[in-house]
Amino acid sequence: MGYIHCCGALHRTRTFRIVPQGNFVVSELDYLSKCPVCGHTVVQLTRIDDDDNISIVRKVNKKAKLFFEKLKNVILYEIRPINYNRINTGKFYLNYNEFGVKKRCYSNLRTLKIGLAENKDLKINP
């Protein structure tokens, strides 16, 4: 998922990978349908060539909609972010003090083995 800078902030966009044309290696199209602040439609085409030079084309409002319609037929796929499941994590954290500095332990407390002695005969079932 890409971001477009508009109205002094970064806004999440839909990102599309398009067919690279000319001597470009990678081409991506970011589409912001409506800015939450000003309401503009923004389209940004970012291309990278063989020498790692970046080319950016940015259109706003009516020109952006026409530009997006023109490039719809060369879109390969939409880049979607991966949703990670937060099954084994919680919102609890452990406060502790080290040398007069308060710190937080965000570790999963089930995996901590505090106070365990090294023993060959001790069986721990995870």
Image (spheres, rainbow, N blue to C red):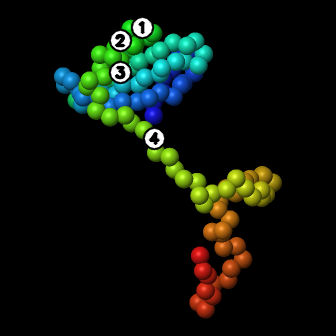
Quadrant containing the C terminus in the rendered view: bottom right
Give the residue type at disc 1.
Answer: Lys
Residue 52 appears anywhere in the view: no
Q: CA distance from mark 3 to mark 2?
A: 13 Å
Compared with 44, 107 (above or below) is below
Give the residue type at disc 4.
Answer: Pro
Q: Which residue is mark 1?
A: 62
Q: Which residue is mark 3?
A: 45
Which of labels 4 and 1 is toward the front?
Answer: 1
* SS for dot 1: helix
* SS for dot 4: loop
Closer to the chain start, of discs 3 and 1, is 3
Closer to the chain start, of discs 3 and 2, is 3
Q: Position of residue 43 (x, y in %)?
A: 41, 18
Which of labels 3 and 1 is toward the front?
Answer: 1
**Residue, x 63% and y 57% (percent of image)?**
89
Compared with 89, 18 (above or below) is above
Quadrant containing the N terminus in the rendered view: top left
> Is there CB contact under 8 Å for labels 2 and 1?
yes
Q: Which mark is residue 75?
A: none
Q: CA distance from mark 3 to mark 1?
A: 16 Å
Q: CA distance from mark 4 to mark 1?
A: 28 Å
Occupied quadrant, residue 75 = top left
Report the front residue among 14 and 113: 14
Closer to the chain start, of discs 4 and 1, is 1
Give the residue type at disc 2.
Answer: Leu
**Residue, x 46% and y 45% (percent of image)?**
82
Q: Which residue is mark 4?
A: 81
- Is 94 displayed left or right of 42 in the figure? right
* SS for dot 2: helix
